[in-house]
Amino acid sequence: MREVTTAQAAQMLREADDILILTHQYPDGDTLGCAFAMCRGLLSMGKRARVVCSDPIPQKYSYLYHDMKECAFEPGFILAVDVADAPLLGSGLSEYADRVDLCIDHHHSNTKYAANLLLKEYAAAAEVVFEVLLELDVTIDEDIAAAIYTGISTDTGCFKYANTTAQSHAIAAQMMRVGIDTYPINRLMFEIKSRARFEIERLALESVEYYFDGICAVMYITKQMLQKSKALESDLDGLTPIPRQIDGVQIGVTLREKSDGAWKISVRTGVEFNASSICGRLGGGGHMRAAGCTVTGTAREACDKILKEIAAEREDERNSVH
Amino acid sequence: MREVTTAQAAQMLREADDILILTHQYPDGDTLGCAFAMCRGLLSMGKRARVVCSDPIPQKYSYLYHDMKECAFEPGFILAVDVADAPLLGSGLSEYADRVDLCIDHHHSNTKYAANLLLKEYAAAAEVVFEVLLELDVTIDEDIAAAIYTGISTDTGCFKYANTTAQSHAIAAQMMRVGIDTYPINRLMFEIKSRARFEIERLALESVEYYFDGICAVMYITKQMLQKSKALESDLDGLTPIPRQIDGVQIGVTLREKSDGAWKISVRTGVEFNASSICGRLGGGGHMRAAGCTVTGTAREACDKILKEIAAEREDERNSVH
């Protein structure tokens, strides 16, 4: 599908109405920040717009749609934000999978399933959305600023990760000048943990195993741990970076047992390895430093599958260097 | 002592030579970032300068003085950076306590023990130092940018805490445009944990107690825990914010047993309470949202002492509102 510029994307939206905004499944701060910033911007232009998501939106994001007046309509234009591939819309939005008019995104793994405004060097899709809103002459009010900030802050791990750029900080500065209070947002996104979350974190820490002379750490989150800690799905946010926090670890792997017995594998890497490439070997994908895939089997088998691909990746890296 | 402007501070430094730069004891990223940014800036002006600290500088900060050429001299001018009070220089630098020519700082608790460039609304003293360096026409190279960034990032909890301002982000953007790679810095400061640190964190989490209907959480770090985990002093960084990360907690207290049996109390608060005011009741001080004090007694007695002051603070807050 064709690539469009920021100006062209803005023009498409200017000409559109009754705009349905799609987020990805298991919504995060970037897809939701993009969706509600865009929705509020389009509403301020006098258009009809609303946000839909295949999964329930976690309570902690409720400030994003606070006081927002969405409206009912038959979609005239379908916009996907931060959705790298049509299946990521989730089962609840599968009817729109082949009907997306415009996709605004930043994922390297984007499959170009629609007309695409794709800026891969941007840390967050919210940075792309911000540029589109400026192009549309939308006034950035506090609600829009909070949504844009949320997208940038969550996708950069609060400006910590390697994807953070000078632009990420510059936009954050602009959003703060609009008058938003960022600490309550960051506290909700990064600090507050339920007691169940404390418990699951302790159990997960105990499961950590080391491979390849300690450059790889593997952590498990099993169904049994979930039961014991009473942790909910929403309590698991932010656990996957933990293995990479151990001194010397360059590849952090988290193996999460799903209800159907499959294992969702998350891989986080430092500059030394490409997480997207490792997960791509098992049919997954994502970013250079954070990617995922799904495998089946016992915990041991699942772990061995990813370790085998990590070993292969290391071998390929060595061969390409020499 | 007199307050000076940024321009006046710059003028004092322009007229000075053989500048000894003092940091505070138990040095953190802000005092060290300030000191090495300033030292490199003064060296680039052709002056003699060097940094001194009462305590050993933790290894993780070694990139700050990498390749820096300090020189030996009899001090002609004494500059303190991020040092709120003369005793905080520590025993190793007590000889300079009443000889400081200029103090560059941002602490509300600053006691004005020297000519002071004090900008209390700044998140980090490194932001003040940055302005002084600009005033001195120093070229901000990658080494200076990394030092300034380190000060801002560490004092704002990587742009997460309530003290973060639009200016903090704007300066971070400028530092990144100089070409620094911020992720390795943030990984060193916020992510990497030794295995001993994992262990002490688990033990500390298990000690958490709740008070005042869960709005206060108290965590202990005892000598016994330190022994069991083999954690060093440097492994304890970043533990004190943990109690405030629990859902509903507005006052997070950490009680740390020192080698002499005294308890170092750290208090972290949300917008609802003033940490500096709470600790001030026990002879301590600090910032609005992060402060400390020292008490003696058993663990139970130490805890009761701070709880009593928190209760008194809550009572005063209630009376001042009605």
Image (cartoon, coloured by chain):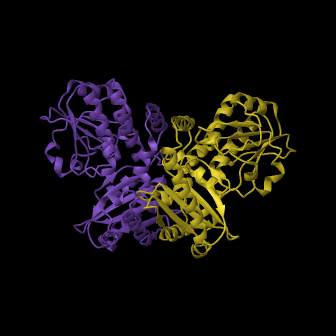
Chain colours: A purple, B yellow
The residue depicted at 43 percent of the width and 61 percent of the height is B214
Q: Position of residue A204 (x, y in %)?
A: 40, 68
Q: Residue furthest right?
A: B74
The residue depicted at 47 percent of the width and 58 percent of the height is A318
The residue depicted at 25 percent of the width and 30 percent of the height is A43
Q: Is residue A66 left or right of residue A191?
A: left
Q: Position of residue B141 (x, y in %)?
A: 64, 37
Whether residue B192 is visible to the viewer of this picture, yes or no, is no
Q: Measured along the vertical axis of the image, is residue B123 above or below residue B247?
A: above
Q: Is residue A8 left or right of residue A161?
A: left
Residue nearest the viewer, comparing B171 with B203: B203
Residue nearest the viewer, comparing A75 with B91: B91
Residue nearest the viewer, comparing B249 with A296: B249
Q: Could you say which quadrant of the image residue A252 lies in?
A: bottom left
Residue nearest the viewer, comparing B289 with B97: B289
Q: Quadrant of the N terminus of chain A?
A: top left
Q: Residue furthest left?
A: A74
Whether residue A253 is visible to the viewer of this picture, yes or no, is yes
Q: Is residue A62 left or right of residue B246?
A: left
Q: Position of residue B122 (x, y in %)?
A: 59, 38
Q: Could you say which quadrant of the image residue B37 lies in?
A: top right
Q: Position of residue A133 (x, y in %)?
A: 33, 29
Tally the marks.
0
